[in-house]
Amino acid sequence: MPAVSQYIRTGTTPVMGPGTSVAQSVRLGDTDLTGLAVLVGSPGPWPQEISLQLDVVGTTAGRADRMLARINRQVTLTRQVQKVSLVLPAVAGSADQTVILDLTGNAAGDSPFTLFWNQSDDGVDYYPEGQAFWNREPVGGDLFFAVY
């Protein structure tokens, strides 16, 4: 079972290109972060290789202030919409903290992809505990995610 999750999806991020970032703030429970799952969209053709970099950033008083971990993964996509799970070594110091999970990807030469998120048009914040960011700017809504 995920420790924290947000499974509402109403659309996708813009295409992830070199230098782009999508992030989500998350308040973790009493164990260190050991995994992240997101929903990825890709136009194909499949199989399609993408690069993902996950920065786990600690916060104090709502401000990002320390890097807890940086994880790089190559992922093979085999269909148009695919759950991608990143199994991580336990991120020391993340338990009982609000962290920002910052994903960048699509190194030069990678195929295009998007991440699914909820951008609520009805004014309801379905995950008020966190905030999504596009290129480090807050956006209304939240990433489709689960953390472990």
Image (tube, rainbow, N blue to C red):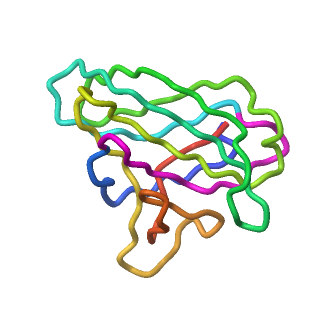
Where does the image place residue 123, in percent across and percent down from the top left?
Answer: 44, 81
Q: Is residue 72 above or below residue 3?
A: above
Of residues 55 and 1, the one drawn nearer to the viewer in this rendering: 55
Relative image position of residue 22 (x, y in whole percent): 45, 51
User: Based on the displayed image, in which of its 4 quarters is residue 32 positioned?
Assistant: top right
Q: Considering the image in quadrants, where does the N terminus appear?
A: top right
Q: In the rendered image of this protein, does residue 130 appear above or below residue 76?
A: below
Tell whether 46 sits left or right of 68. left
> Quick check: 118 left or right of 145?
left
At x 66%, y 48%, the residue is 4
* Image coordinates for residue 8, horizontal then vertical, percent: 44, 57
Query: Which of 56/75 is in front?
Result: 56
Left or right, 17 with reference to 2: left
Residue 94 vs 128, above or below: the answer is: above
User: Does 24 lie within the magenta span?
Assistant: yes
Quadrant housing the C terminus: top right
Q: Residue at x 61, y 57 (%)?
A: 25
Camera-side residue of 70 and 5: 70
Tell me the magenta residue range. Answer: 17-33
Q: x, y percentage for residue 83?
A: 41, 33
> Measured along the vertical axis of the image, is residue 84 above or below residue 2?
above
Q: Residue at x 72, y 36 (%)?
A: 33
